[in-house]
């Protein structure tokens, strides 16, 4: 089976709709097929990977913890739109410190998240075989 | 609806309420599958429960295999070993004994 480049676009915040958790489930399922997977967070999607989420008040599962497992699934390319962060009064320091262990570099922990401009993001999107928008 | 020691389970035998889990339930589930839980089974079951607590998902078999090898030694980090403990699949059967939902992506 040949490898394709899959990008999952996350454009909605975590808990108002089912899109965010559904996207994450699809990503984890697709990971089993060992494709080249990346995730992009734009618009309200940036709220999905914000630090210190607490869902006690809404009685829902805090699935933000699951993003920390992505490294184990060899998913280590998470792109975040700098413009979308800024529009919401957020910056890089508000994002969860997600890491992966680099098998080719003595299992050193490396950051998975990259904050980039929309222009850079468009370029990466244009290089994909498949883009799925949630 | 079926139950195991009073705890509700779905049609595939997975606990409906994760909070119902006890070690006795795990032992009963294993007994129903003709397995006696030994130390080696509990290593995996306890690991699955810790993983779920931390990440809110049951790990895929590939991830479980790698993690078990890292934690308990290389000789245990392979699917042959894990299948010898859980013949119906470390993901599916292991997660069921551990009181977790079926792993995401498990068919």
Image (cartoon, coloured by chain):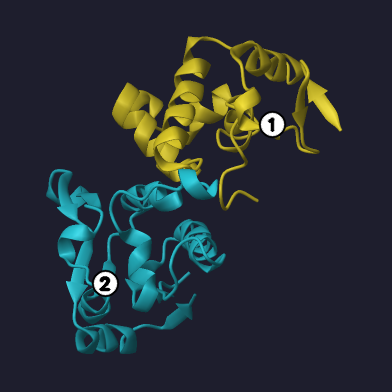
Chain colours: A cyan, B yellow
**Frontmost residue, B63 versus A13:** A13
Where disc 1 sits, the SS reads loop
Residue A110 in the image: above or below residue B102: below
**Frontmost residue, A13 versus A110:** A13
The quarter of the displayed image where residue A37 is located = bottom left
User: Which residue shows up at 28% across the image and 53% down it?
Assistant: A51
Residue B101 in the image: above or below residue B6: below
Res B54 label: none
Residue A93 in the image: above or below residue B1: below
User: Which residue shows up at 54% across the image and 63% down it?
Assistant: A22
Q: Residue furthest front?
A: A57
| Image spot of residue B76 (x, y percent) | 39, 25
User: Which residue shows up at 50% across the image and 16% down it?
Assistant: B42
Give the chain of mark 2: A
| Image spot of residue A1 (x, y percent) | 48, 69
User: Which residue shows up at 45% across the image and 19% down it?
Assistant: B43
Give the chain of mark 1: B
Residue occupied by mark 2 = A80
| Relative horizontal placement of residue B18, taking residue B42 as reference (left or right) | right
Mark 1 is surrounded, within 10 Å at the Cα level, by few (under 14), some (14 to 19) or many (20 or more) other residues, namely many
Q: Is residue A39 visible?
A: no
Q: Residue furthest right?
A: B1
| Relative horizontal placement of residue A116, taking residue B33 as reference (left or right) | left
Residue B87 in the image: above or below residue A95: above
Where disc 2 sits, the SS reads strand
Query: Mark 1 to mark 2: distance in Å?
Result: 37 Å
Res B15 label: 1
| Image spot of residue A24 (x, y percent) | 47, 60
**Frontmost residue, A72 versus A79:** A79
Mark 2 is surrounded, within 10 Å at the Cα level, by few (under 14), some (14 to 19) or many (20 or more) other residues, namely many
């Amino acid at each position: 089976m040949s490898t394709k480049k899959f990008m999952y676009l996350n454009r909605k915040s975590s808990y108002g709709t089912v899109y965010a958790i559904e996207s994450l489930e699809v990503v984890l399922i697709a990971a089993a097929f060992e494709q080249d997977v990346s995730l992009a967070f734009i618009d309200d999607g940036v709220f999905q990977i914000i630090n210190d989420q607490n869902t006690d008040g809404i009685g829902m599962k805090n699935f933000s913890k699951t993003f920390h497992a992505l490294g184990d699934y060899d998913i280590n390319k998470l792109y975040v739109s700098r413009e979308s962060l800024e529009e919401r009064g957020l910056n890089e320091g508000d994002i969860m410190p997600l890491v992966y262990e680099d098998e080719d570099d003595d299992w050193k922990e490396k950051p998975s998240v990259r904050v980039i401009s929309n222009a850079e993001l468009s370029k990466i999107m244009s290089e994909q075989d498949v883009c799925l928008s949630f | 609806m079926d139950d195991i020691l009073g705890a509700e389970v779905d049609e595939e035998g997975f606990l409906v309420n994760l909070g119902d889990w006890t070690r006795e339930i795990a032992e009963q589930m294993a007994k129903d599958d003709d397995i006696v839980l030994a130390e080696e089974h509990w290593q995996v079951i306890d690991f699955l429960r810790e993983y779920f607590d931390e990440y809110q998902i049951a790990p895929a078999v590939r991830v479980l295999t790698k993690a078990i090898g890292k934690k308990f030694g290389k000789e245990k980090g392979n699917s042959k070993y894990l299948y010898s403990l859980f013949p119906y699949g470390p993901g599916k059967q292991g997660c069921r004994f551990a009181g977790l939902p079926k792993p995401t992506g498990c068919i």
